[in-house]
Amino acid sequence: MYKDLAFDHDDELIDELRDLDYEQGDDSLFDSDYRDLNFDDYSMDEPDIILDVPYVPTDEKIVHAMLDLAEVTSQDTLYDLGCGDGRIVVAAALERNTRGVGIDMDPMRITEAIEYAGHTGVEYLVNFFEGDLLEADFSQATVVTLYLLDLVNVQLRPRLLDELRPGTRIVSHAFDMGDWKPDQRQSCGSINIYKWIVPAKVAGTWQWQTSSGETYRVELKQKYQQLSGKAWIDGEEAQLKNALIKGDLLLIRDQWALLCAAKDESWLLLKASYRRHRRLKSSKTNNLVAICNSPMLA
Ligand SMILES: C[S@@+](CC[C@H](N)C(=O)[O-])C[C@H]1O[C@@H](n2cnc3c(N)ncnc32)[C@H](O)[C@@H]1O
């Protein structure tokens, strides 16, 4: 289900951000001397501010590719952490009617973003706040966009996993997230963009009974969206072929069955679609209620 992904870029991409031959207007903080600056000391407009990432706006083509990859719609709430001049938030509002929030530590960027939203007439859909992205509350996001650095992404990772709802999409321009492998990667010319879907926490023991009276028990271990574990049917060990979590959808496959769990109000409904008795060539589909002791979808 997950694509085979190759990761071959880390240092190159950091260099890319540092060495970007950026063609833009006067609002860029980059100048020919920026290579001599330590990122930690970097802010030209506000010398007292210590930014974790320098300001480099995302190219318009990449903005659209990021919105496409995240499948942003008018139902979403998009947060751009380190929003710069607000271009990603404003583009989503303008083109997709999406509510958005931009957070940036540099007040100059926030002023620009507010002005930009005003000029484009989307101020009723968007908000921009001055703040530290490492501390800001982004729990209401259904889409998060990032153009930071891989080290900052990794620093942010525990909060993204713990505070965002399962199913929230995260899209990052150029930088990945350490050992949390993306669900999707896309190339835009020489630039990669990455997408993760926040997985529900499903580690633990799942037990449920089918309408025909069999008791299933599955013990799952989880690392990000990757699952491993064991399964039993009526106390007898069964082969757990694979288990995948995609947002709040859990797929468990044993030698007979593909079981899908999805959030349905406060219950977990397990839909079993399987050939239980292959030798009889019969197939059936059951709706089952799971008894689950994991914190999934709480
Ligand atoms: C590479 S720029 C990306 C701007 C915008 N997201 C875009 O893609 O066009 C990174 C932005 O993060 C902001 N930034 C850096 N460290 C930050 C922090 N700790 N909290 C909030 N913003 C920060 C910078 O001011 C800058 O505007």
Image (cartoon, helix red, strand yellow):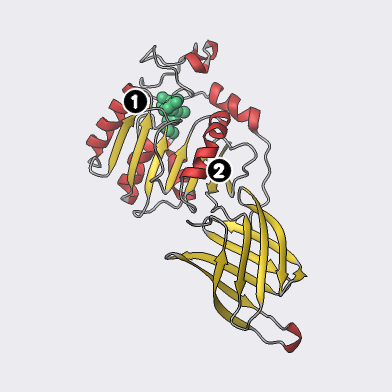
Q: Is mark 2 within 8 Å of ligand 1?
A: no
Per the image, label 1 sits on a secondary structure element best described as helix
Q: Earlier in the sequence, mark 1 or mark 2?
A: 1
Q: How many marks?
A: 2
Q: Amino acid at mark 1?
A: Arg
Q: Is residue 185 visible?
A: yes
The residue lying at 40 percent from left, 16 percent from top is 49
- Nearer to me, 140 or 203: 203
Q: Amino acid at mark 2?
A: Tyr
Q: Are marks 1 and 2 in contact (CB under 8 Å)?
A: no
Coordinates of residue 5 in the picture (x, y in percent): 67, 47
- Nearer to me, 220 or 38: 220
Q: Is mark 1 within 8 Å of ligand 1?
A: yes
Coordinates of residue 65 in the picture (x, y in percent): 47, 45
Q: Which residue is mark 1?
A: 109
Q: Residues within 10 Å of mark 2 (few under 14, many from 20)?
A: many
Q: Residues within 10 Å of mark 1 (few under 14, many from 20)?
A: many
The image quadrant where one finds the N terminus is bottom right
- Residue furthest out toward the bottom: 280
Left or right: 193 in relation to 28: right
Numbered mark located on residue 282 in the image: none
- Nearer to me, 270 or 207: 207
Coordinates of residue 249 in the picture (x, y in percent): 54, 61
Q: Which residue is mark 2?
A: 194
Residue 138 to residue 105: above or below? below
Residue 49 to residue 22: above or below? above
